[in-house]
Amino acid sequence: MDRQGNKYTFLYASVMVIVVATVLAFISEALTPIQKKNEEEAKMIDILRSVNIESTTADVAEKYNKYIGDKVFIVNYEGERQETDAQTAFNIDLSKEVRKPLSDRQYPVYECHLDEGEIKYILPVRGKGLWGPIWGYIALNEDKNTIYGTTFDHKGETPGLGAEIANQAFQQQFVGKSIFNEGGELVSIDVVKGGAPDDAPHGVDAISGGTITSQGVENMLMDYFSGYEAFLKK
């Protein structure tokens, strides 16, 4: 075959494309279990951080199993516990659930038993910031009203502005706040531009210069607390 001809060039390019595609597919397939394991570990680290338990990839599985383990379940909009196993509940993809109406979503609950015997209920939340998705975990005391701890993260919020939701200084404000008022009405948490009073039971300071992301956190919390409301009131 004439190596200078178009036919040879076309066949050579086609073979190379097939070879490269095969190699990339093989690499992708080989890396999938590793990627999944890394994602699960990162998720467990965030869940534990919401109850003030620090962990690393080296010990997160041990700590997660100690404090939560198989005590993970799903509730529906009516607050009814669903018949699923813990792994199924853990694997719920909130990026898909958040697109559904509140009444159609599945709501995972992580029940954490601390060393002192205290029980905390950890609720995952997901919403929208300025540039993309934001998410987090809210740990509630046994009264299912008072916030024990939080962790928030984001995909692409502006460094020094909206990205501050991932910092401890912002997250620490939520500790001790209540999501129901004295009459039992769900009020969630207000993220107040200009600052909330120190003794505000349902308010925290918004991020300076991060108004839209702060509003995204407020909307995210109200959205998901509304979905969990029936469960929290039972």
Image (cartoon, rainbow, N blue to C red):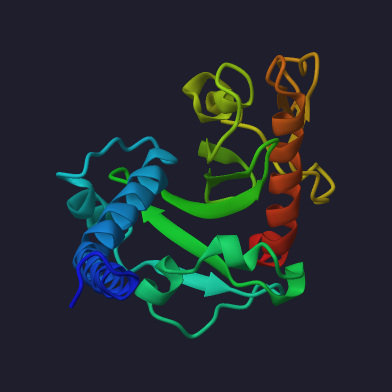
Residue 163: x %, y % from top left: 57, 26
77 and 160: which one is in front?
160
x, y (%) of residue 187? 81, 44
Residue 19 visible within the image: yes
In this view, which residue lies farthest toward the bottom?
83
Front residue of 66 and 227: 227
Which quadrant of the rendered structure holds the N terminus?
A: bottom left
**In terms of depth relative to the viewer, which is nearer, 127 or 31?**
31
Q: Nearer the viewer, residue 185 or 124?
A: 124
* Residue pictured at 62% horizontal, 78% vertical: 80
Which quarter of the image is occupied by the C terminus? bottom right
Q: Is residue 218 above or below residue 86?
A: above
Give the image location of residue 148, x and y in percent. 52, 38
Position of 234 compared to 202: left or right? Answer: left
Vertically, is 210 above or below 19? above
Which residue is pictured at 48% across the width and 23% down the height? 168
Q: Is residue 164 above or below residue 32?
A: above
In the picture as drawn, the residue positioned furthest to the left comes out as: 58
Residue 227 lies in what quarter of the image?
bottom right
Number of labels in the image equals: 0
Residue at image location 20% in from the left, 72% down from the top = 2
User: From where the camera sits, is residue 202 visible?
Assistant: no
In this rendering, position of residue 157 left or right of residue 49: right
> Residue 151 at what x, y percent from top left?
49, 37
Residue at 63% across / 19% down in the picture? 161
